[in-house]
Amino acid sequence: MKRLLIIILLIFCSNSFAQDIGDPLKEILTAKSLKFSFEISSNAEWLKTNPKTNTIKSSMSFVFDSIDYREGSARMIGNQGSVGIAVFKGAQGVSFIEFTQTGSIITTTVFYEYSNPDRKLFKAVHSRHTSIAGAFPSQYYGDAEIWSMD
């Protein structure tokens, strides 16, 4: 009888804990808007044969809204205005892809993992494959949160 009581108690406690931390995959895939914030970045100045890399503190944020996983589309809203982007749902996260007029590709991925479960923040990375007087790739590391535009 004690064993049964202990098993029931363990099941109840584990289910309660699982509900408290949430389900990142479900939360992300039901979100219509996500706000991204990045505080660390790295880039490579690739003017000669070997790239010179730098890691620095940065401050960048933007919002993806009108996210439609079935259609594979969303809108990015940043400091330069807004643009339509492609959305791809994967096994580890969701990737948002922008194809710029210059032919560069910019990707942002939100992972189905919390970076801060208490604040419901998800791990995110933003990569730019650009050319500014030569190849200048960069990557930003930070968080995404479900965002309400209200």
Image: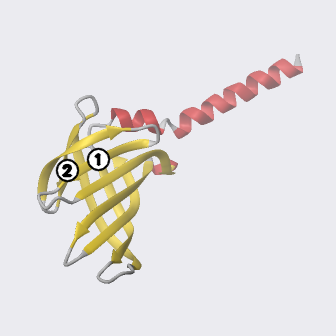
Query: Residue at image x 17%, y 58%?
Result: 103
Of 105 and 94, nearer the camera is 105
- Which of label 1 and label 2 is nearer to you? 1
Query: Residue at image x 13%, y 50%?
Result: 83
Q: Secondary structure at mark 1?
A: strand
Query: Are the residues flagged by discs 1 and 2 in contact, CB closer than 8 Å?
Result: yes
- Residue 67, position as x, y percentages in the image: 24, 38
Query: Image quarter for residue 134?
Result: bottom left
Label at residue 76: 2
Label at residue 36: none
Q: Secondary structure at mark 2?
A: strand
Query: Image quarter for residue 102?
Result: bottom left
In the picture of the structure, the residue carrying the numbered disc 1 is 96
Give the vertical position of 146 relative to 101 (above or below): above
- Residue 60, position as x, y percentages in the image: 29, 65
Give the vertical position of 10 relative to 37 (above or below): above
Disc 1 marks a residue whose amino acid type is Phe
Which quarter of the image is occupied by the N terminus?
A: top right
Q: Residues within 10 Å of mark 1 (few under 14, many from 20)?
A: many
